[in-house]
Image: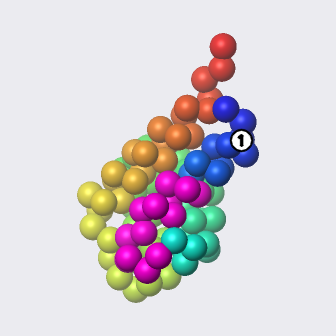
């Protein structure tokens, strides 16, 4: 999978997530920050905490860590699906 495909899948997954139920397309800044974090981290717990902090900074609301861990796991799986080539 090419980097652009991975990027688009990450954006799509984060838009679908919509943790504050405000609709797709309202998280552009947060999505950009999370995607950068996904590229920098491979640890689910560490990434989940970063995701939680990114959204808390923007919305002044805390997303439960378990929710962040679920999305972190999905994002890491997408990233890793592009790193295996035969």
Which residue is found at the position 54% from the left and 34% from the top? 80
In the picture shown, does residue 85 fall above or below 12?
above
Q: Position of residue 29 (x, y in %)?
A: 61, 74
Which residue is found at the position 63% from the left and 43% from the top? 6
Which picture quadrant has residue 66?
bottom left
Label 1, residues with CA under 10 Å away: few <14, some 14-19, many ≥20: few
Q: Quadrant of the N terminus?
A: top right
Residue sticking out furthest to the top: 86
Residue sticking out furthest to the bottom: 60
Is residue 12 highlighted in magenta?
yes
In the picture shown, does residue 14 fall above or below 45?
below
Q: Position of residue 57 (x, y in %)?
A: 47, 80
Which residue is found at the position 27% from the left and 67% from the top? 64
In the picture shown, does residue 6 fall above or below 70?
above
Lateral position of residue 37 relative to residue 85, left or right: left
Q: Position of residue 3 (x, y in %)?
A: 71, 41
Q: How is the image coloured?
A: rainbow
Q: Is residue 52 visible?
A: yes
Is residue 13 highlighted in magenta?
yes
Which residue is found at the position 43% from the left and 45% from the top? 74
Q: Position of residue 11 (x, y in %)?
A: 58, 57
* Residue matched to label 1: 3
Which picture quadrant has residue 86?
top right
For the magenta stretch, what is the residue range?
A: 11-23
Lateral position of residue 81 relative to residue 61, left or right: right
Element marked by disc 1: helix
Lateral position of residue 81 relative to residue 65, left or right: right
Q: Is residue 37 visible?
A: no
Residue sticking out furthest to the front: 23
28 and 65: which one is in front? 28
- For the image shown, how many numbered marks are present on the structure? 1
């Amino acid at each position: 999978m090419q980097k652009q495909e991975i990027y688009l899948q990450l954006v799509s997954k984060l838009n679908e997530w919509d943790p504050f139920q405000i609709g797709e397309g309202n998280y552009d800044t947060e999505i950009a920050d999370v995607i950068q974090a996904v590229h920098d981290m491979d640890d689910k717990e560490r990434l989940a905490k970063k995701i939680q902090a990114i959204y808390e900074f923007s919305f002044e609301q805390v997303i439960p860590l378990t929710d962040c861990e679920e999305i972190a796991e999905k994002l890491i799986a997408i990233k890793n699906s592009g790193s295996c080539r035969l």
